[in-house]
Amino acid sequence: MSKIEVEGNEADKKKFYTNLYRAYAKQTWSDADGRYRDPLENIQQTQNKQPMYGGDAFWNTFWNFNPLLALISPDILNNWVLTQLELFDKPGWTNNGPTGLEHTGIMEVTHEIALMVGAYQKGIRKYDVNKLWEAVYHNATEEGRWIEGSGYAGQRNLNAYRKKGYVPIETGAACQTLDYAYTDFCTAQLAKALGKDKEYAYFIERSENWRNQFNQETKWQTPKDSAGNWIADYDIFSGYKWIEGNGWQYTWYVPHNIKGLVETMGADLFNKRLEEGFEKSVKHRFAAHAFDRHQETAFEYYINHGNEGNMQAAYLFNYSGKPWLTQKYSRAILDIYYGDEPYDGWQGDEDEGQMAGWFVMSSLGLFEMNGGVTSDPEFDLSSPLFPKATVHLDPMYGKGKTFTIIAQNNSKENIYIQSATLNGKPLNTPKLKWSDVIKGGELVYEMGNQPNENWGKE
């Protein structure tokens, strides 16, 4: 717990360290000598007694859980990559949620790809890089399948997605289109890093398939059939053909191209809809639990921090010209959604530590929108929860290095960033490069109780 030291009131510190503890949600499914039972029930042996990890699904862990491990426990992140490459090498597929090292396929996404690519881009590379590319490329080109005695592996509707540019409602869930597009972006970034120009061009183009489900008339993501017809009389609050969410929530889910989403929807409409959603979600503590992909009656639920698909919402304002609203609503979620007692610690789905990781990283005012999978990863910035936080960076970045975040005049009322400096130099954008953080140093904010609409406005 001492890897990050925070100073502030006791209730917030209790929440912080409880969430930091919970973020380490892995389970070890191998014996002390490196033996384990694979998804086909065969006994396998890892090299160098490498541990095999398992747990819950990596559903959108690329926003907070992955970068948290990269900062303070890259050895664990590296072992996660090794686990995935071992599973790919033996049974033949990586695994989004290796519960007991089985393929559950429950989230119908392959966000282990984002974990692996993000680790590579941050220099965490104690594994066979060629094997990494083979695993990522296989996931992006081979349709997923049912593994007898285990469950689904891979992107199970990939062929329909490649043929149509989206996943039709006769085939699967509409959110698969969005997740496949993001994973295409991750694949493209690894291809680019490895000098595979042809593959980069192909996958970066495919990553724009989210546009094929965006209804230009309504400006909402909308499920469509194989003939290209939108669902008739579609209610944006319906959970039909969405996984643990609704059309309102999933419209915002283009983590690799928020700029494109803002331009396509229009900045004014983008901000109006999103702010309305936050204001109407306060009474629900930002936890819209009601979801059912088969429900006939659509409940008017907006922000759903209780499930991973909508946990980026507060940070979207950084891309639409209103970063002070990112500061306002990220702090509101920290204060309102997360409690400090056993019955209200959090009100949602803790996938592999992402729910907890969100609290920890957002308390520091840090968030990775595209999962840090590009060659020069960067954080989105927001209002820190604590007056002072010191991150003891892992020794792989240099022995004894720290990154300190100071929020002068910080309080429950003074939640707005007035100005910022990085190592004494003015910082005027709500972005911070990963490379600047791991160098060590000091990020200092001046806080106030009213928005400074000139700071961070891109």
Image (tube, grey):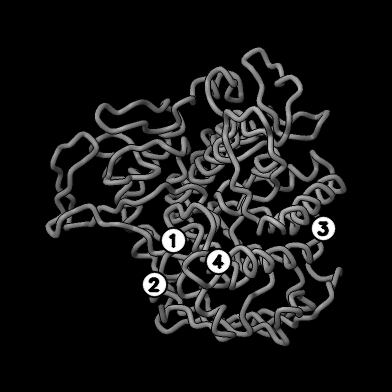
State the SS at label 2: helix
- Give the residue number, with chain letter if any, for mark 3: 321
Residue at screen point 33% across, 46% down: 84
Q: Amino acid at mark 3?
A: Gly
State the SS at label 3: loop
- Give the residue number, with chain letter if any, for mark 2: 396
Which sits earlier in the primary sequence, circle 1 or circle 2?
Answer: 1
Q: Which mark is residue 273?
A: none
The mark closer to the camera, 4 or 2, is 4
The mark closer to the camera, 3 or 1, is 3
State the SS at label 4: helix
Which sits earlier in the primary sequence, circle 4 or circle 3?
Answer: 3
Residue at screen point 64% across, 31% down: 209
Q: Which mark is residue 359?
A: 4
Q: CA distance from mark 1 to mark 4?
A: 25 Å
- Residue 237 placed where, x, y %? 70, 36
Give neighbour class at mark 1: few <14, some 14-19, many 20+ (Cα, 10 Å). few
Residue at screen point 64% across, 27% down: 296
- Give the residue number, with chain letter if any, for mark 1: 123
Q: CA distance from mark 2 to mark 3?
A: 36 Å
Q: Amino acid at mark 1?
A: Gly
Which sits earlier in the primary sequence, circle 2 or circle 3?
Answer: 3
